[in-house]
Amino acid sequence: MGKAGNDKLKGKSGNDLLYGGPGNDTLTGGSGQDTFIKRPGQSDDSITDFDKGNGPSNGDKIDVSAYELTFDQIGFEDESDGLRMRLGGDSILLQGLNVPALERSDFVGLVDDVFAETGRLTLDHNPQTVTLERSYDNPVVIAHVATENGPQPVNVRVSGVSGRDLTLQLQEPNHLDGAHVDEAVNYMVVEAGSWVLPDGTLLEAGKAQSHKLS
């Protein structure tokens, strides 16, 4: 592990973890299947000997889990001395490689495989904030009241949807008093777009604006 400043780190034989820390660092893994760790806000690093494998179980890896990025959100540029990989304001230069050398299997911590999540909670008429398991660029939220504990009709109001949070509450029709007993609510959050499930089913998620519950 490096310190603040421009470090030079070199691994030994075996499977090493190399983390340069802040500064423009130069990392050399050596022999073995090494993992190079990158964290946000820590400038531009260089890897001198990235050994690309041919699948998720072999070769060197780049750990970008702290960025919460999909593979498509990583930028790749050819330079005279290698492949520049851009992670927002940070970058890594992979010496001796070029576009399109890297694949999803060369990374650790991508969020590509997760485009949706589900949950269940107990709600009444008071707003409740839900923190999601991952961040979404354009989340689509579907919520359903799964029980009938109260005598009055009720639906779920969704509000305050951001990258990783949303607010849910029960809402009765306007002519009622608005107070409602606890109900179980199921919800699903999907990244907007078209997704193909493992069985070949096409799932499309989008939004429509409405000012009424029914």
Image: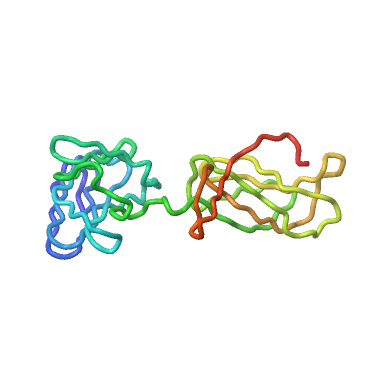
Vertical arrangement, residue 23 with respect to residue 121, above or below: above
Give the x, y percent position of residue 68.
40, 47
Determine whether, in the image, residue 156 is placed left or right of residue 8.
right
- Residue at (54, 51) in percent of width and height: 202
Residue nearest the observer in this picture, 111 or 201: 201
Determine whether, in the image, residue 192 is placed left or right of residue 6.
right
Please identify the quadrant where the C terminus is shown. top right
Residue nearest the observer in this picture, 84 or 20: 84
The coloring applied to the image is rainbow
Give the x, y percent position of residue 71.
36, 46
The total number of labels drawn is 0
Vertical arrangement, residue 126 with respect to residue 200, above or below: above
Determine whether, in the image, residue 103 is placed left or right of residue 70.
left
Vertical arrangement, residue 88 with respect to residue 53, above or below: above
- Residue at (27, 39) in percent of width and height: 76
Q: Which residue sits furthest front?
A: 200
Give the x, y percent position of residue 31.
13, 61
Determine whether, in the image, residue 110 is placed left or right of residue 53.
right
- Residue at (66, 50) in percent of width and height: 143
Give the x, y percent position of residue 52.
21, 54
- Residue at (65, 57) in percent of width and height: 121
Snapshot quadrant of residue 207: top right
